[in-house]
Image: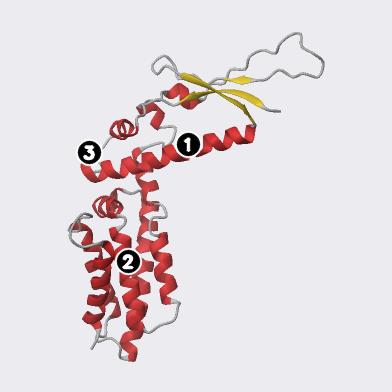
Amino acid sequence: MDLVVTEIIEGDRLDSDTLAGRVQHRPPIAHCARGYAPPVFIERSFGISSPPVARLVGRLSAPTLVRRRQRRSAEREKSIHAAALRIFRQKGYHAASMQNIADAVGLYKGSLYYYVSSKEELLVRLFEGRADQVLGEIRAITYGTGTCTEQLRAMVRAYVLGVLRNLDSVRVYLREEYVLPPAALRQVHAEQRTMRDLFERVIGDGMRDGSFVGTDPKLAALALLGMCTWVHRWYRPRGRLTETAIADDFAERAVRMLCP
């Protein structure tokens, strides 16, 4: 059965009544023609503090309505994460407040807790899966074809681009790493070890076949990763060099540092 839905358009701020999703069902019409089922009207109230603006959106199936709400919720969560990352970078984790984040996305503070239970949980979410893409690219390079020199060049390029395209994440992580709860911190450290191991393996292979100089691939890997990560300190998106130009330069420098 179709629903005739009176949808409330979200304003600049939403209070807790919105998020509670109060549903009021109008009582059925007592006398109606045989075989006719009266439409169900669903209303959501924003409460006194944020007057609702209603719009009749026509007849929507229940699945369509659910998908629309899920899409809207996902968009809201994305904006919350972006605002939190920006505020954590600007103010620092401890100085930032949930009120700051709520103000940045146009929500009441109470409404923000519908999406995230605490500031700590929000910090954890910001780093969930952040390294997956770069790790996947670098892992694919190490298992692909090419010489050790070619692989290392491609790995450094991918790593530097990953840093430059996620500046806020890198800056917040390096400053707030030990604010993360133990389980999340262990996960982040595991990803770091995986990254180091991939570089160490390629460098070690190159040292054994004579492509690279040196006898300590672990130390060489740490040196390269430190050099590449440090770009977040001085890179400016509107500077004279593009992301790709810097990544290409670092890739060549890394190879020259290790070649005989």
Disc 3 element = loop
Q: Is residue 8 toward the left or the right of residue 92 in the image? A: right
Q: Which residue is mark 1?
A: 73
Q: Give above or below for 213 relative to 54.
A: below
Percent position (x, y) of residue 119?
A: 34, 39
Quadrant, the N terminus: top right
Q: Residue furthest right?
A: 34
Crowding at mark 2 (Cα within 10 Å: few <14, some 14-19, many 20+):
many
Residue at image position (79%, 13%) is 33
Going by the numbered disc 2, the residue's amino acid type is: Tyr
Q: Which mark is residue 96?
A: none
Q: Where, by quadrant of the figure, is residue 254 drawn? A: bottom left
Q: Amino acid at mark 3?
A: Ala
Which mark's residue is nearer the viewer, 1 or 3?
1
Front position in the image: 168 or 34:
34
Which residue is identified by label 2? 159
Which comes before the other along the chain, label 1 or label 2?
1
**Label 1, label 3: how many angstroms apart (C-alpha)?**
27 Å
Quadrant holding the C terminus: bottom left
Q: Which residue is mark 3?
A: 95
> Residue visible at 42% across and 37% down?
76
